Image (tube, rainbow, N blue to C red):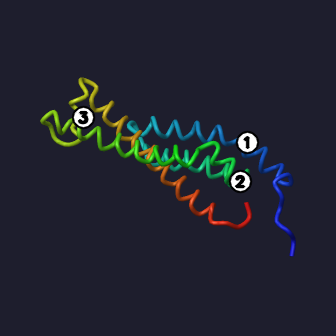
Amino acid sequence: MKPPMRMHEKYILRVVSRAFIPFIFLFGLYVQFHGDFGPGGGFQAGVIFAAAIVLYGLIYGLAPAQRVAPPLAVELGMATGLLLYAGTGVVSFFKGLNYLDYSVFGSHGQHYGILLIEAGVGITVACTILMIFYAFAGRGGDQ
């Protein structure tokens, strides 16, 4: 049986991933901010952001991926995204309006409200996927 490839033997994968990961993040930003005008939004952008870091972790290993996105920061990101989503609705609720009524944010309330909601969803989804990846990748085996 052939031994597994060592990190220094993955030259092509390392070069190609290093070239593509910034573009994956850029596409994630496009999907995030285009979400209130067309298909896409927070969930899709969160998956794309997480996929870039998961790709980095698969190519370079779990420890370098955790240096890029530390587990504590990922846990805080999960909570922050959820609070951003829920907090957007609570602000309108405490102003006497319906939950997630965006008119509380002024004349451009619909745009700002959707932007905050989509940001909260994107942060939560990206961090949740990363925590799942960290949990499974950290169980042992070849790294």
Place residue 85 in its image quadrant: top left
- Residue 61 is marked as 2
Mark closest to the chain's N terminus, 1 or 3: 1
Q: Is residue 87 above or below residue 127?
A: above
Q: Kindly state the secondary structure of the residue where label 3 is placed.
A: helix
Instruction: Mark 3 and mark 2 in contact? Answer it, CB < 8 Å.
Output: no
Please state, as top left, top right, bottom left or bottom right, where the C terminus lies in the image: bottom right
- Type of amino acid at the residue the image marks with label 2: Gly
Q: Which residue is rendered at x = 12% and y = 36% of the image?
A: 96
The CA span between labels 1 and 3 is 40 Å
**Position of 86 compared to 47: left or right?**
left
Q: Which residue is rendered at x = 33% and y = 30% of the image?
A: 112
- Type of amino acid at the residue the image marks with label 1: Arg
Q: Which residue is rendered at x = 74% and y = 64% of the image?
A: 142
Where does residue 89 sit, x and y in percent of width and height?
25, 41
Place residue 87 in its image quadrant: top left
The foreground one among 114 and 67 is: 67
**Position of 61 compared to 130: left or right?**
right
Instruction: Mark 2 and mark 1 in contact? Answer it, CB < 8 Å.
Output: no
The foreground one among 37 and 112 is: 112
Please state, as top left, top right, bottom left or bottom right, where the N terminus lies in the image: bottom right
Q: Nearer the viewer, mark 2 or mark 1?
A: 2
Q: Kindly state the secondary structure of the residue where label 2 is placed.
A: loop
Mark 1 crowdedness (10 Å alpha carbons): few <14, some 14-19, many ≥20: some
Q: Kindly state the secondary structure of the residue where label 1 is placed.
A: helix
Where does residue 72 sit, x and y in percent of width and height?
52, 46
**Mark 1 — residue?**
18
**Mark 3 — residue?**
102
Where does residue 26 sit, x and y in percent of width and height?
58, 36
- Type of amino acid at the residue the image marks with label 3: Tyr
